[in-house]
Amino acid sequence: MASEISKYESVAAVLEGIIPLLAAGPRIEMVPSRESYGRIAAEDLVSTADVPSMDSSHMDGFAIASRDAEEASASNPVVLAVAGETVLGRKPRGRLLRGQAYRVPTGSFLPTGADAVVPIEDTSLVGKRITLSSPVRRGQFVYRAGGDIRGGQVVIEAGKAIRAQDVGLAVALGIGSIGVFRRPRVALLATGSELTDSLSEAEGVRSSHASVFKRLVEESGCVAIDLGIAPDVRKEILSGIESGLKEADMVFTTGGTSVGRMDLLDGVVRSLKPRAMFHGIRMDRGRVSGVAVVEGKPIVMMPGPSQGAMNAFVLFGLPIIRRMTGRGDGGIVVRAKLKKRWEARRRFPDFTKVVYVKLTRGSNGMIAEPLAAETESMTILTKSNAYVVLPERRTFLGVGSYVDAHLLPGFSFA
């Protein structure tokens, strides 16, 4: 039987109660640098060498010793002997002697003794000799050793997502593997005898939540495990949750969290003897959500209605995921100006609110249009591309006020 909710805990109190009990903090694994895209760096990645490793040429031309051409002019040209040519990616052999020049392509290392480069168009080449008719200064068109990266320099900071260009940098530095946070495994279980995976109208209520949260979980850096649908039968729900606890680091459920006769989730989770259990949270919408910790693994119990389920995901699922993936930030937040006024529902004015907004770009920055709909509405989510979290007792937002709009990968694409 379902349990009555006698007390609603604050969002902050729930998070403070469960986070210390989680066993699965960020775990580190080594992955090949070429396959590290999108992962979260677990430690600072430090260059072991200067880049470039030697002085190199900015231009196609000739490497020379600047002292040989300090006084060059049209009336006093300097003639240098071309003693050799460098090859891209290879350290030049030999040493540049007085009165000599080396032909160099862009990006090639300078021979020892050279400290300047003269572009080919600024020379007159005849046979194996070049003539310079203007002075050359030290360091001209030279890319100094370590000009891009110094040995010992941090090139990727711990806690940052590894981007495409970061992968290229790691490969360029010869780094074979990178320590990253392991992707947590999230098991998703939908509950409800009315649910079906069939797209036929006659089969029942289509199970759409799995498609939503599977993608959001994956976009948040986790591996999603779809446990399918459990009917409103105690042993079926228990079996599904136990399977999720065995296969994954956390379990997210949808449906069955209210206090009706067929809302069995509270009793099922309590039978697992959780170290902490919260059912009934001061959040609007989704107050019948719940969170528990069983054997160090969180169970986030999201209600069936779309808006309530999404609220539970952003207020509880995301903070837990960010902890387990090593993401220290709160995600991407943009400052936006409110397009129209917004008021909280009178029924729960002192609850934490999640306001879904449609962000657009205005002439002076981002504009946020607050949206409102019933808890069951899916279109409030499809029309929005960001959300605003308002604390308890905040019940009103005026036209022209500024809000912090959260962007969520997979939800925003903004």
Image (cartoon, helix red, strand yellow):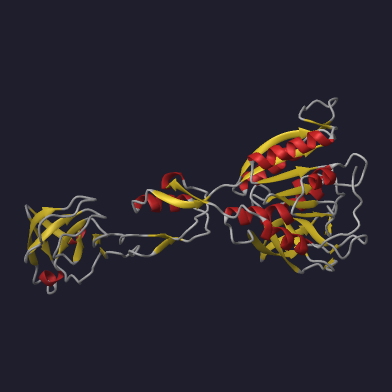
Relative to residue 105, is residue 34 drawn left or right? right
Horizontal and vertical percent for residue 287? 85, 54
Q: Is residue 74 visible?
A: no
407, 4: nearer the viewer: 4
Q: Residue at x 79, y 45 (%)?
A: 269
Relative to residue 170, is residue 88 drawn left or right? left
How many callouts does the rendering have? Answer: 0
Horizontal and vertical percent for residue 167? 43, 50
Reply above or below: 29 against 349: above
Q: Residue furthest bottom?
A: 71
Q: Is residue 355 visible?
A: yes
Relative to residue 157, is residue 191 drawn left or right? right
Relative to residue 373, is residue 401 drawn left or right? left
Horizontal and vertical percent for residue 307? 81, 49
Q: Residue at x 57, y 56 (%)?
A: 326
Horizontal and vertical percent for residue 267? 84, 45
181, 107: nearer the viewer: 181
Reply above or below: 23 against 68: above
